[in-house]
Image (cartoon, coloured by chain):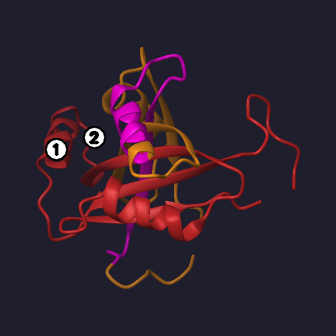
Chain colours: A orange, B red
Amino acid sequence: MLPAAPGTLVGVSRVVVDVVLKPEISDPQGQAVLGALGRLGHDSVRSVRQGKHFVLEVDGTPDEAELKQIAETLLANPVIEDVELHLPTD
Amino acid sequence: MLPAAPGTLVGVSRVVVDVVLKPEISDPQGQAVLGALGRLGHDSVRSVRQGKHFVLEVDGTPDEAELKQIAETLLANPVIEDVELHLPTD
């Protein structure tokens, strides 16, 4: 394992969970951002989708099954949202 | 460049912008999630911070300077938030 980065607690892992709306669900927040970008001249942006980004600090080695369950059932609404779980790679 | 993944529009790049609160800004949403996780027995989670996750589709090759400006001035509030810009790597 690499040495801990400055400011990182030893023995604590950083897990990222991104929650995005399923493609078939409309996203009024993202559409509002897209409209604003167009009015400001940023015409190269074709679409914007807005989701949630959670950063969790977990004691010791992350338990992937537990974190998957937390992400899918507590951080997201599985009816309308998909989840991307990013565990530390080292 | 790799062939486009199924469902990907040719000539369109996917850019991800994560917006997180600066470390010194308190995060009541994240603290509420942390409290709920503790009550449900997920004691290994030490902290939760909640941010925003934007997925932009951009025509052609992304203009890094333009996207950085969009991310820092339009998607985030630079007084209280930090931005992480993820350009496509291929």
Question: In the image, is A7 to the left or to the right of A67?
Answer: left
- Are discs 1 and 2 both within one chain? yes
Q: Which residues are magenta?
A: A8-37
- Image quadrant where residue B34 sits: top left
Say which of B8 and B62 sits in front. B62
- In the rendered image, residue A28 lying in the magenta stretch gets the answer yes
Disc with the residue nearer the chain's start (1 vs 2): 1
In the figure, residue A17 lies in which quadrant? Answer: top left
On the question of residue A60 being in view, the answer is no
Q: According to the image, label 1 marks what residue?
A: B29
Q: Which residue is mark 2?
A: B42
Front label number (1 vs 2): 1
Q: Is residue B88 visible?
A: yes
Give the residue drawn at x 32%, y 74%: A9
Dot label at residue A89: none
Decide: is B45 above or below B8: below
Residue A22 belongs to magenta span: yes
Q: Where, by quadrant of the figure, is residue B61 drawn?
A: bottom right
In the image, B55 versus B68, the foreground residue is B68
Residue sitting at 52 percent across and 40 percent down? Answer: A84
Circles 1 and 2 in contact, beta carbons < 8 Å: no
Q: Residues within 10 Å of mark 2 (few under 14, many from 20)?
A: some
Amino acid at pointer 2: His
Residue type highlighted by circle 1: Gln
Determine the residue positioned at 42% across, 18% down.
Answer: A80
Image quarter (top left, top right, bottom left or bottom right) of the N terminus of chain A: bottom right
Please name the residue shown 26% across and 52% down the image: B48
Residue B74 screen position, x and y as percent: 33, 56
A78 versus A76 height, above or below = above
Q: Secondary structure at mark 1?
A: helix
